[in-house]
Image (tube, rainbow, N blue to C red):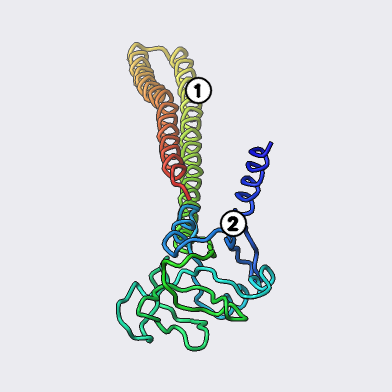
């Protein structure tokens, strides 16, 4: 029974140690760990393995919203790792530049506690929210100290995702436009084939009517020469019509094949593009 209670307590402890998501007043989301303690490098890893990053604060408005959130969670200030560091500079100078680990950008905005960063004992390379500050101000501290952390979405990932999503939309619009264009062209070809067929049928009928009238006239006038001329005249349009009909049949038979081949190639292009885009993980 004792071991059972120990397991229950262990489970509860693990559950409590799980970092929690919070929403700030400016719409941003943060994953905050305060129970479990890590050095800066491990905290950075804990964020990275969740496809997140240690928080990067580049504006006063973002900082104010985050401080407001932290006060609502903890009341008083507590030590939490931020994404800032001095690139592990060995200089003693307290005026050394600091950077954000995720983007590599220099700090253009800062919220240091008075007298910080002071690089005490020339060993303070990482940035935390200072537990002794009433407003979660920043402090440089030894990177091997153990604190909780604040994670946020990866900026580079979000920018890449947004750009790729826009490109995907452009590609799909181009495919749709191409598909509609090919469908229109296919319909135009089929319409031309049917129009040609109707013209041939009309021409055949007119030729037959003309020959019938000519034959009727010849039968009344008689004469072997006229009969021979009539035979030759009848032979020419007949041969011409046979040739036209042959070309038409070839066109009619080839048109669906061409249209189907174009449709199949179009489908293959769409499928390959979809496969490529679908295999990209955001």
- Disc number at residue 205? 1
Q: Camera-side residue: 245 or 254? A: 254
Q: Camera-side residue: 184 or 55? A: 55
Going by the picture, which residue comes out furthest to the front? Answer: 2
Q: Position of residue 36 (x, y in %)?
A: 55, 58
Q: Camera-side residue: 225 or 134? A: 134
Q: Secondary structure at mark 1?
A: helix
Q: Is 136 left, or right, of 40 in this rendering?
A: right
Q: Position of residue 85 (x, y in %)?
A: 40, 73
Q: Residue 266: name its quadrant.
A: top left
Q: Is 85 left, or right, of 1 in this rendering?
A: left
Q: Residue at x 62, y 81 (%)?
A: 134
Q: Position of residue 276 (x, y in %)?
A: 41, 42
- Would you place residue 18 above or below residue 222 in this image? below
Q: Earlier in the sequence, mark 2 or mark 1?
A: 2
Q: Nearer the viewer, mark 2 or mark 1?
A: 2
Q: Secondary structure at mark 2?
A: loop
Q: Residue 78: name its quadrant.
A: bottom right
Say which residue label 2 marks: 19
């Amino acid at each position: 029974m004792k071991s059972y209670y120990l397991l229950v307590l262990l489970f509860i402890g693990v559950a409590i140690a799980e970092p929690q998501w919070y929403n700030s007043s400016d719409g941003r989301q943060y994953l905050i760990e305060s129970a479990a303690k890590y050095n800066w490098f491990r905290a950075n890893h804990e964020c990275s393995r969740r496809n997140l990053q240690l928080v990067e604060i580049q504006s006063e408005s973002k900082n104010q919203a985050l401080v407001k959130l932290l006060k609502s969670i903890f009341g008083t200030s507590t030590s939490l790792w931020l994404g800032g560091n001095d690139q592990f500079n060995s200089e003693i100078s307290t005026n050394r530049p600091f950077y954000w680990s995720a983007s590599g950008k220099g700090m253009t905005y800062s919220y240091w506690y008075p007298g910080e960063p002071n690089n005490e004992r020339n060993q303070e390379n990482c940035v935390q929210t200072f537990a002794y500050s009433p407003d979660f101000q920043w402090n440089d501290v030894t990177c091997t100290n153990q604190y909780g952390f604040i994670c946020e979405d990866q900026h580079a990932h979000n920018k890449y995702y947004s750009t790729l999503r826009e490109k995907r939309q452009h590609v799909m619009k181009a495919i749709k436009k191409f598909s509609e264009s090919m469908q229109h062209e296919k319909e135009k070809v089929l319409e031309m084939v049917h129009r040609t067929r109707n013209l041939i049928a009309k021409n055949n009928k007119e030729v037959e009517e003309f020959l019938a009238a000519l034959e009727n006239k010849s039968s009344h006038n008689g004469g072997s020469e006229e009969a021979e001329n009539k035979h030759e005249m009848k032979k020419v349009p007949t041969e011409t019509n046979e040739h036209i009909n042959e070309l038409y049949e070839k066109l009619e038979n080839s048109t669906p094949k061409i249209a189907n081949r174009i449709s199949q190639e179009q489908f293959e292009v769409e499928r390959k593009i979809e496969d490529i885009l679908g295999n990209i993980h955001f």
